[in-house]
Image (cartoon, helix red, strand yellow):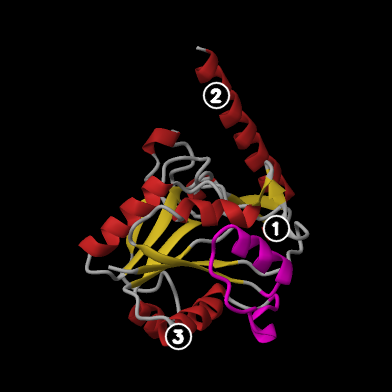
């Protein structure tokens, strides 16, 4: 089986300038996603789609395949990851060869593990290769959420559950942006990674579920890196 890993890394970022090439704990953000995919046997190539010559050079030096720069019409604020994915997939299959699945690894999820990628691929094969998408449990349950209405707070969902304890709330999940794995046919048909009957892969780790969107997310990611380094130092000294 062949899985093409695709990393989409546009140059622009409104909330964090040059986010995809900015160094997170000494390593460019995009390299975190490249490095985790390198030693997975089912991945035939790691293809990077970017409109930035600088990001392209960084990715190429890290061992990724960067055969072109993304067309301008796919490098705007309104461009979708699906459009970029289809563009990259069409090129790869026309120029290099067919693949069984496309694995989208967004640079904004730097802490996904090799183990969870491998388990997602196993699910993909087990369920006849449709679509596998990663989820995490919600941090703020909607049954406890309120909305501001005419100067007063009203329950976002009208119910009798406001006084439930956290352990009694029904489990709910949210896309965490870490792993999207789909067949080429499904992506072309649905124009989406999570339309129709998708197979969920649940990630419990708060660190692995971090999706860097703003400065606070970035600072939180740096805190996790520092914490992990301290844990390694403590283990080495024990």
Which tag is nearer the camera, tag 1 or tag 3?
3
Q: Earlier in the sequence, mark 1 or mark 2?
A: 1
Which residue has dot 1 on it? 21
Q: What stretch is highlighted in magenta?
A: 51-77
Tag 1 near tag 3, CB within 8 Å: no
Image spot of residue 186 (x, y percent): 35, 79
Q: Earlier in the sequence, mark 3 or mark 2?
A: 3
Q: Which residue lies furthest to the top in this view?
A: 238
Image spot of residue 126 (x, y percent): 21, 61
- Badge 3 crowding class, 10 Å Cα cut-off, few under 14, some 14 to 19, many 20 or more, is few
Q: Is residue 157 above or below residue 198?
A: above
Q: Nearer the viewer, residue 65 or 77?
A: 65
Which residue has dot 2 on it? 231
Q: Residue at 59% across / 50% down in the picture?
A: 146
Which tag is nearer the camera, tag 3 or tag 2?
3
Report how far apart the C-alphas of labels 3 and 2 lie in the structure. Answer: 45 Å
Which residue has dot 3 on it? 95
Report how far apart the C-alphas of labels 1 and 3 lie in the structure. Answer: 27 Å
Q: Residue at 29% across / 63% down in the picture?
A: 124
Image spot of residue 173 (x, y percent): 42, 52
Q: Report the number of discs.
A: 3
Q: Is residue 1 above or below residue 108?
A: below
Q: Residue 84 carries which label?
A: none
**Residue 145 visible:** yes
**Residue 155 visible:** no
Image spot of residue 10 (x, y percent): 66, 69
């Amino acid at each position: 089986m062949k899985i093409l890993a695709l990393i989409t890394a546009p140059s622009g970022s409104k909330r964090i300038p040059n986010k995809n090439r900015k160094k997170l704990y000494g390593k460019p953000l995009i390299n975190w996603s490249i490095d985790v995919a390198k030693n997975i046997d089912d991945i035939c190539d790691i293809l990077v789609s970017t409109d930035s010559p600088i990001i392209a050079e960084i990715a190429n030096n890290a061992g990724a395949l960067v055969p072109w720069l993304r067309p301008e019409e796919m490098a705007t604020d309104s461009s979708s990851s699906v459009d970029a994915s289809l563009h990259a997939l069409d090129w790869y299959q026309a120029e290099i060869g067919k693949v069984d699945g496309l694995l989208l690894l967004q640079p904004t999820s730097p802490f996904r593990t090799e183990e969870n990628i491998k388990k997602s691929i196993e699910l993909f094969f087990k369920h006849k290769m449709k679509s596998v998408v990663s989820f995490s449990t919600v941090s703020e349950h909607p049954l406890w959420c309120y909305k501001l209405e005419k100067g007063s707070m009203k329950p976002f969902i009208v119910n009798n559950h406001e006084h439930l304890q956290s352990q009694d709330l029904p489990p709910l999940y949210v896309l965490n942006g870490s792993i999207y794995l789909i067949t080429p046919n499904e992506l072309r048909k649905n124009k989406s990674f999570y339309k129709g009957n998708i197979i969920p892969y649940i990630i419990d780790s708060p660190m692995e579920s971090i999706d860097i969107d703003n400065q606070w997310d970035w600072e939180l990611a740096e805190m996790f890196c520092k914490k992990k380094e301290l844990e390694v130092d403590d283990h080495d000294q024990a």
